[in-house]
Amino acid sequence: MEFLFEYGLFAAKVITWVVAILIVVGFVVSMASKQKQRPGSLEFDSISETFDDLKHQAESVLLDKDQLKEKQKADKKAQKAKKAKKKDADAETDAKPNLFVINFVGSSMAKEVDSLRKEITAVLCVAQEGDEVLVNVESGGGVVHGYGLAASQLQRIKDKGLKLTISIDKVAASGGYMMACVADKIIAAPFAIVGSIGVIAQIPNFNKILKKNDIDFEMHTSGEFKRTLTLFGENTDDGRQKFRSELEEVHQMFKDFVSEHRKDIDIAKVSTGEYWYGTKAKALNLVDDIQTSDDFLLKANDTHKLYRLKYATKKTLAQKLGIAASEGVENVVTKVMNQAGRWHF
């Protein structure tokens, strides 16, 4: 009995400490969650300098002292010649153009488009004639309106007169491929997933469960097809037919969009909703070259100055403490409800 008493006392102390800690953490999180979202900032990194650093590190390991000394002399000589050339009146005409690199990793809700539009705006503000843009797209698609906007953002680059290359290292399917086909040139890794030119919409219906439990559900609309299918009401054949016709209409828009930007494509053959790996995608004219973004950049470094830019949003204290995880659970539930009946590329 004495043992049980001591054990119970110990357990009570532990519980007290845990509760106290949770109260303190809860208070801190509550205060932090009231902080306003901090504005983001644009980050520029020189990829060319990164390549130079890697090259120098490799040379320092692979070359012996004499070879390294000779290499350093040659580099200094080349640097002097470059400086002398800059003094010439025509030196500006020999300056390397810029290649701006943007990474887009898209979610189903395409929330990353907000950062993409800021990154593209930044490029358009500083880009000059002869500059180019490479966008690494990684996405399996998502909501139609989100990826439609993403494609429109990429179109801004071409409208400015800049050459746009899209790289697909892993996957650019459905809405991801819709973005890619805007480019002047599409490159893809051999096993990258490409295509899936189709539209999908999924919606559960709980009407039978409600009826079984004698639960009434009412929905009032103005307009015959204000709501075609519903989660809780009883769906009709007319509603299903209308929903299906709208689905086909969106699919036709998708096919027209791809055909407009990829003239040599057999749209009837590739718009079945299937996807293909890089090498097969090239045979179907979905992409132009089989190449990774790394190889593209390494080659471009000889003719361009490479810069990677990213719009980064600063995290609040609440996010750092993990409140974002609990918000994420809530968002999942909300998204399931909001996405019901929405079309997805």
Image: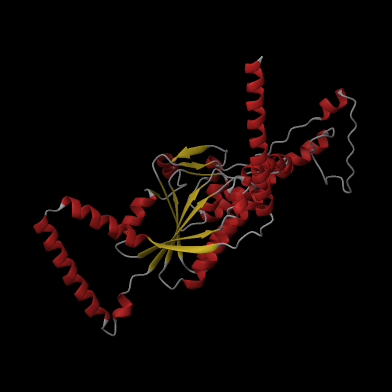
> Toward the viewer: 327 or 84?
327
Quadrant location of the C terminus? top right
Q: Residue furthest toward the bottom?
A: 89
Q: Nearer the viewer, residue 18 or 84?
A: 18
The residue depicted at 67 percent of the width and 34 percent of the height is 16
Residue nearest the observer in this picture, 105 or 182: 105
The image quadrant that residue 26 belongs to is top right
Residue 48 visible in image: yes
Q: Indicate the position of residue 148 as horizontal and vertical percent values.
A: 62, 54
Is 340 left or right of 104, judged from the image as shown?
Answer: right
| The N terminus lies in quadrant | top right
Is 172 or 236 nearer to us in this picture? 172
The residue sitting at the left extreme is 66
Q: Position of residue 277 (x, y in %)?
A: 44, 39
Residue 28 placement, left or right of 306: right
Q: Is residue 111 visible?
A: no
Total numbered labels = 0
In the figure, is residue 124 to the left or right of 129?
right
Please determine whether, in this image, residue 97 is positioned above or below residue 26: below
| Residue 44, position as x, y percentages in the image | 44, 64
Q: Given the current orientation, which residue lies at the most extreme top position?
A: 1
Q: Residue at x 20, y 75 (%)?
A: 80
Residue drawn 11% across the image and 63% down it: 70
Q: x, y (%) of residue 131?
A: 41, 68
Residue drawn at (17%, 50%) of the image: 62
The structure's colour scheme is secondary structure
